[in-house]
Amino acid sequence: MMNTLYAVGLVLTALTISIAALYILSVLDPARDRKLRKRTSQEKDSVVFLFDDQMLTDVTPAGRQILDALPRHNSGSDWQHLSQILEARFPNLSDQIGELAELGTLSIPSTDGAHRIDAEWRDGLARIHLVTAGTEGADPIVDRVSFDAMRDELDGLRAIAHHAPVMMWREDANGKITWANKTYLDQAADPDTSDEVASWPPQKLFDRPRLEDAKNLETPRRVAVQLPTDGERHWFELHDAPLGTEILLTAIPVDRVVNAEKSRTEFVSTLTKTFAHLPIGLAIFDRKRQLTLFNPALTDILALDASFLVGKPTLFTFLDRLREKRMMPEPKDYVSWRQQMADLESAAVNGTYEETWSLPTGQTYRITGRPHPDGAVAFLFEDITSEISLTRRFRRELEMGQSALDCIEDAIAIFSPGGVLSMSNAAYTKLWGNDPSTTLEDINLGDAIRTWRGTAGDTPVWRMLKEFVAAHGERQMWSDHIALLDGRQVDCHFVPLVRGATMARFHVRPAQREFQPAPNSAMHLTP
């Protein structure tokens, strides 16, 4: 049994080797190629292609014209290029040719019946013969196939131009319209003319500039025309491209862009007018840190020339000028000043810069930096000299008033209309054992009464005081007295002040002395 299987294996191996050898000889046989190439050369007026797999090995001159009629759009094989040319007339051509090796011959008609492909498989090569029905390879075949391929591409280009939403047209050297797409014809149509009446050339909507003027015009250039369809003025961007002796023009509508630019200009103008009346100096620097916008108050506050600001100085040039005019605090050295200005810029970009500049001249400025869109930054310069002076004067008056209260021997506490302790003196701290100045939180009347109860206990006077402070309208001064836990007597006076405030005054009565007779007194006892 083993000997039989071994013999069968040897026979199959020999048979496989023989078939492979025959195949290699058939493929590499030079006589095969010469025979097919000779046959192909004899059919030079026919459209014949000879393929080895997907590689083109030979082609007739008529076939070469078809391949050269349309350029390759990719780096595919020779067969892919041919199938792309013929696929409009022969759908699924590649799938059908794939069965040629099994069938031997194929005849594939075109979808319109005007052409057919006669394919033949011989000696490992595929012979593709393209013929026109009824002519069997006459000269018109080449012209018809090339014409059909170019016509398909032309139809596609016409469809693109027809459906393009922008106006496109061609003009000759004299400015006469030689072609226009549907969008242009629709816009140029006279609404008063019947649709059935067509005139050529169409109405010219755009005037081309003279040759000597065209060199000085920007491309694309923006123009405004009045269209006959609606009688309104519209804005377009004109693009032109030379096409031989003619020129192709394209008009892109930019009404929205123009309206947006107009709105932005009006908005900037409104802001400029608003900033012109702003008492605070404003300086806006763009992303390149050049001054792009400022208001008149900036020149008044910082004493800068308008000509200098109009020149769009950079941020550091602007700050250098302020330093020269001594309109900013003078640092110890220039290096530290530059670092300080760099920190100023970075802080303004983050929206955290706010500083007060106190100048040797006595002026005080508040500088605020704020980020703006597109990397810009704005600085506000506010002269707060009068505000600082008023604050300082008010602080001096408060200190003077506090000193006057501290000189009074009676304990005094002043409550606001809301019942919050506003002021007290040193005698108050000594009497009640509590210093309101040591806490940052507000002390209301309830908190004060709780402190008082620790020294004087509970008394109806506290309830009456709460009602008195919370009362509205006309109030009258009233007095009462309380006793402290240590036995001292205190006279209480509650006085209404202006704007609803209340003053509580506590007077500690002096201690009563015990009666003792004088040494030389006449009073004596008789024995």
Image (cartoon, rainbow, N blue to C red):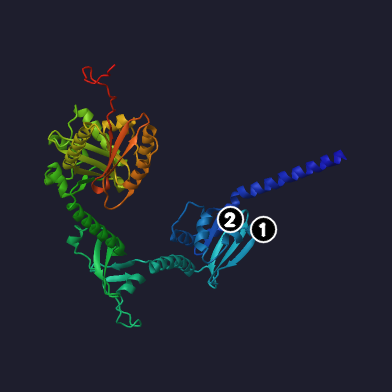
User: Which circle marks residue 187 in the picture?
Assistant: none
Q: Residue at x 30, y 82 (%)?
A: 193
Q: Earlier in the sequence, mark 1 or mark 2?
A: 2
Q: Nearer the viewer, residue 281 or 396?
A: 396
What amino acid is found at the position of numbered circle 1 in the picture?
A: Glu
The quarter of the picture where the C terminus appears is: top left
User: Which circle marks residue 35 in the picture?
Assistant: 2
Pick out the residue farthest to the right: 1
Where does the image place residue 263, in percent across and percent down from the top left?
26, 60
Is 380 drawn above or below residue 141 in the view shown? above
Is residue 200 among what the camera can see?
yes
Return the residue at label 1: 102
Badge 2: few (under 14), some or many (20 or more) residues near its Cα, within 10 Å?
few
Pick out the residue farthest to the front: 527
23 on left or right of 379 = right
Where does the image place residue 141, in percent across and percent down from the top left?
49, 68
